[in-house]
Image (cartoon, rainbow, N blue to C red):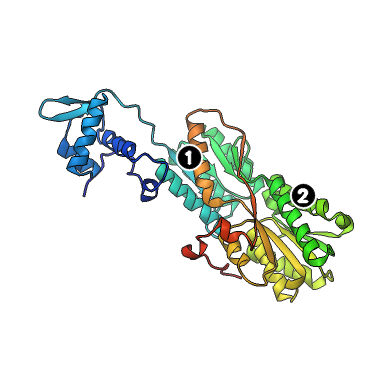
Amino acid sequence: MATRPPGAPPAPSPRARRDLYLVKSLVHASEILWAFQHSGETLRLRDVMDRTGFGKGMCFRLLYTLHHCGFLEKVEGHRYRLTSEIRRRKRYRIGYAGQGQDSSFGREVHASLVRAAERERVELIVVDNRYQPKVALRNAELLIREGVHLIIEFQTDEAAAPAIASKYFEANLPMIAIDIPHPGATYFGANNYEAGLLAGRYLARWARQHWNGQVDEILLVELVRAGALPQARMRGIGTGIREVLHESVNTPVISIDGDGQFKTSLERVRRHLRGSTARYVLVGAANDPSALGAARAFQEAGRAETCAIVGQNAEPDARAELRQPRTPLVGSVGYFPEKYGDGLIRLALDILARRPVPPAVFVRHHLITPENVDHFYPNDALLGVETYAGY
């Protein structure tokens, strides 16, 4: 088996090789250049074949072309060497403090980051914050000791953000914060108010179509500890409903803190329903686990037919639920976590190269519904996406 020289980045992944935008001949030529560990090293054709894994004919043609273009020179004994030191991009080490693997959103972000880091030849050091601020603080200290060049932080507790950010600031480490702002960090993630508006407007249109606009209660399942910015999506939900259903101005609005988790949302919505007599209820949830927990509570109470729920994220669990008949989940605002990795790694490399970057990079949102879920995610069945395990 061919071996790569020490310090060289990994060969392009099969996914990268299938990228329609890649010029394969240039990829192959770059592999030849990477076979040389420094400008003074001389290699025979056989040496280059061993280090790249290319066949003799292909390897010879690439060497001949690179010599013709001036990147390589021939030396005695049928050897080649670099004509000058090729300016190589430093192989960065990026720390990723993930939110956790309990939700499909966290798993999707993690998987997309791993793919993007591999494609861009970035070393990704991953730790799990486990949805706990104390763990996130310990992970910050760990990543600093690991000598990473930049941090991508994904933790939900706004109250812990200043302490975490302070550690990275003292270590002179640039930071990107996913979805929850951290002092001094470049923000990457949701356009929260816009995402809320999408949800609210859709809920109101759904109520007009199915209930002739009658709404007895608006229930917001919030994520209080995430802080003010994610709270903007809840304000957007209320505004979106009122924009479409002007008669809902006097409709009671009930807020419940579901903590962004399925079980907590299930228990607290279940408790609320024991004392609620509202018939037609619109539910706006801070994320999909909260939406699924609320849906389960309404189903248990035999009231699924008289509620409509919209979540946030359109993560795999929610997409699976949208495909179920008679589900009270009527939509989820898409954040497309499977694409986060590409955007995050591009942003990280721009920061590390000291290129100007905006203070916030927002993802684009679309409302995912039972009618369009297969259009946006046609491969879910092939990937084995199933209904939420606790649902």
Closer-to-camera residue (235/242):
242
**Residue 344 locus on image (x, y percent):** 52, 42
Q: Amino acid at mark 1?
A: Ile
Estimate the x, y position of residue 178 in percent, counting from the top left.
58, 45
**Mark 1 crowd level (few <14, some 14–19, many ≥20, 10 Å Cα):** some
- What type is the residue that disc 2 sits on? Arg
Query: Residue 158: x and y, percent?
Result: 66, 46
Real-space CA distance between mark 2 and mark 1, rounded to the nearest whole angstrom = 37 Å
Q: Is residue 40 above or below residue 61?
A: above
Q: Earlier in the sequence, mark 2 or mark 1?
A: 1
Q: Residue 7: horizontal and vertical position, in percent?
A: 31, 38
Q: Which mark is residue 318?
A: none
Residue 139 visible to the viewer: no
Q: Quadrant of residue 258?
A: bottom right
Taking the image as shown, residue 57 lies to the left or right of residue 103, namely: left
User: Is residue 29 shown to the viewer in this render?
Assistant: yes
Give the residue number, with chain letter if any, for mark 2.
235
Q: Residue at x 41, y 40 (%)?
A: 120
Which of the numbered marks, if any, corresponds to residue 144?
Answer: 1
Please give the name of the residue rendered at 50% of the width and 28% of the height, measured from the top-left corner: 354
Question: Label 2 neighbourhood size at 10 Å, few (<14), some (14-19), many (20+)?
Answer: some
